[in-house]
Amino acid sequence: MAVSEPAAATRPPADVGRYVSDAWRERYFAACDALYALGAPASREEDVETSFGTTHVYRYDPPAAPDGDGDAAGRDRIPVVLVHGAGSCSAMWYPNTGDLSAERTVYALDTPGDPGRSVQRAAIHEPEFAARWLDETLAGLGLDRVHLVGSSYGGWLALNQAHRRPDRLASVTLLDPGGLEKVGARFFVWIFVSLFATFAPKPLRPRLASWLEQPVLVVPELRRMIRTGVRAYRIRRPAPKPLTDAELATVRTPLYLLLGRRSLLVHPDRQVERVPRLVPGARAEIVSGTGHGPQIDHAAATDRAMLDFMAGVERARAAARTPGVPG
């Protein structure tokens, strides 16, 4: 796969993420490529220039029809844009790209400031900057209407977009997202213990994975990518501030919230009551048998739920534009 550009010869600003060396960057890319290989093959890759750096994007198209013309219906539908969690890259969507791209074109972004093939030049952790970066990326891809999906930190980015720059958004799906509560100590303890557990002997990993709700321990390629990323890349940003009730109440984009029953990032029962109360028409559900990764632990069911939600949003919008047609 193509590399966006060589590592900078000089140290970047203190609030901009960086690779520790060219050699570690290449090791990380190799680990990512092994994980990408577990999912659907990308139709193409491209780099989008923004005010904050270059965003590397993977595109997944619906499969070609028997006549070779492709799935015209799928390609004509509003596309899906995936935004990954902190400390990761778009390879984390390997369980989901196949199902989602079977019905719609999918774009998976490498967020600048996290390890991946994007090249960051300026910080984006301020909410307005983050919204501007994402809007410029969507514009650079030629997308004026998308279904935005964000996981964890990517969920904060998606929620922030719905609050600040919603014009390109057909819907927003949040998968155990940041941005709803202050990140507590229990989440950081879980991250630390999970990382430590990646060094456990192989026979112990399935038991630890079940106890920690951490699939990274039992998928060798995912484990390797996470461990390599910790060594290879230095993230330089604070944890995002959660949206206040007043900020959340500004959201008018159709919103779908999926939380893990054993999430340590948010309090699920609290948020499935709060979000629909503040965001008109928002849908919120708790997924049993998972913690912070419903899209990994229950990939097929989560993908189906997201696709059904997106289709429902489009039907409702079409019905609203056609007088006399029931929603």
Image (cartoon, rainbow, N blue to C red):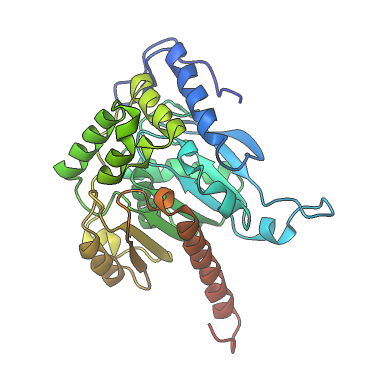
Could you tell me which residue is drawn at 62 percent across and 35 percent down? 45
Pinpoint residue 318: horizontal percent, then vertical percent.
59, 75
Could you tell me which residue is drawn at 28 percent across and 51 percent down? 179
Front residue of 305 and 242? 305
Pinpoint residue 84: horizontal percent, then vertical percent.
42, 42
Pinpoint residue 63: horizontal percent, then vertical percent.
70, 51
Pinpoint residue 169: horizontal percent, then vertical percent.
49, 58
As drawn, is 240 to the left or to the right of 322? left
Instruction: Confirm whether residue 284 shows in the render.
Output: yes
Vertical order, 195 against 128 (above or below):
above
* Residue at the limit of the structure toward the left, as seen here: 185
Could you tell me which residue is drawn at 42 percent across and 48 percent down? 296
* Residue at the limit of the structure toward the bottom, as seen here: 324
Instruction: Confirm whether residue 56 shows in the render.
Output: no
Front residue of 55 and 127? 55
Vertical order, 264 against 117 (above or below):
below
Front residue of 235 and 98? 98
